[in-house]
Every structure is written in structure tokens, then in C-alpha cells.
Image: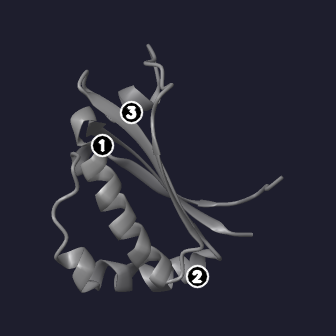
């Protein structure tokens, strides 16, 4: 089965185009190092919760939008081998800061256990 890195963050709503440009540039780098697919989604039906929710998890402000992104890898081994190379790539090193507060981003790696 494949391996997935997932990310949730909140981006200033007025920076949608800037986020898209940043995400596409980063996605190309990940794909060069073995990612099978890189998907970035802009929230349009992400309800606030009272106890848990995507907006609460990333401390989304009223002028921000939740994004949900994932990278699909052939395996965790491929992902682990690629990660340091991606982070050392000059395009990542010279990229401008992402258009969101990375301290409020949540992320993790996931082993796929079912795929229909």
C-alpha cells in the first residue's frame, strides 16, 4: 500500500492565488523526488466545531480559509529517502515563506490500510 503525508493549515483568504503558486511550485519538487501525487484543496464547506474541527485545529481566523493537502508516495521508504533531499533542494531553500502561519499547521504521515 501507499503512504500519505497530510497537512491542514489556515491561509489568509486574500492570499489564495499566492498559496496556489506556492503549493504548485512545492508540489513539482516533491514529484521529482518520488511523490506520486500532490493535492492541495481550498476549503469551501468547513464548518467550525464546538469541540473539534479543522478550523479549531489550525486556529483559523475569520479572514482565513482552511486548506487540506496531501502527498501520496509509493511507500514510506520512498518518502523517507526523498524527504531530506526535498528539504535540501535549492528551490525549497530559496522559496519565499509560505503564505500562512506554519506554526498553526497540523501534519502527519499515514499508512494506507484501505483503498476502495
The image shows residue 13 at horizontal and vertical percentages of 27, 33
Q: Is residue 59 visible?
A: no
Dot 2 falls on a residue whose secondary structure is helix
Is 78 left, or right, of 10 in this rendering? right
Query: In which quadrant of the rendered view does residue 22 lie?
Result: bottom left
Residue underneath mark 1: 16
Question: Mark on residue 25?
Answer: none
Residue underneath mark 3: 57
Residue underneath mark 2: 77
Residue found at x 28% / y 40%: 11
Residue at the front extreme of this rendering: 17
The image shows residue 49 at horizontal and vertical percentages of 46, 17
The image shows residue 84 at horizontal and vertical percentages of 36, 82
* Tally of numbered discs: 3
Mark 2 or 3, nearer chain start: 3
Dot 3 falls on a residue whose secondary structure is helix
88 w.r.t. 12: above or below? below
Mark 2 or 1, nearer chain start: 1
82 w.r.t. 97: above or below? below
Residue found at x 58% / y 62%: 4
- Distance from the alpha carbon under mark 2 to that under mark 3: 29 Å
Residue found at x 75% / y 69%: 1
- Distance from the alpha carbon under mark 1 to that under mark 3: 20 Å
Q: Are marks 1 and 3 in contact (CB under 8 Å)?
A: no
Is 90 left, or right, of 112 in this rendering? left
Residue at the right extreme of this rendering: 116
Mark 1 or 3, nearer chain start: 1
Amino acid at each position: 500500500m501507499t503512504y500519505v503525508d497530510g497537512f491542514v493549515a489556515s491561509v489568509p483568504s486574500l492570499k489564495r492565488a499566492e498559496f496556489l503558486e506556492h503549493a504548485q511550485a512545492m508540489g513539482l519538487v516533491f514529484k521529482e523526488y518520488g511523490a506520486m501525487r500532490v493535492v492541495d484543496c481550498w476549503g469551501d464547506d468547513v464548518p467550525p466545531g464546538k469541540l473539534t474541527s479543522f478550523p479549531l485545529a489550525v486556529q483559523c481566523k475569520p479572514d482565513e480559509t482552511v486548506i487540506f493537502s496531501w502527498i501520496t508516495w509509493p511507500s514510506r521508504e520512498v518518502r523517507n529517502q526523498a524527504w531530506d533531499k526535498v528539504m535540501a533542494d535549492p528551490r525549497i531553500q530559496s522559496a519565499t515563506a509560505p503564505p500562512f502561519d506554519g506554526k498553526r499547521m497540523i501534519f502527519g504521515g499515514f499508512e494506507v490500510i484501505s483503498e476502495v
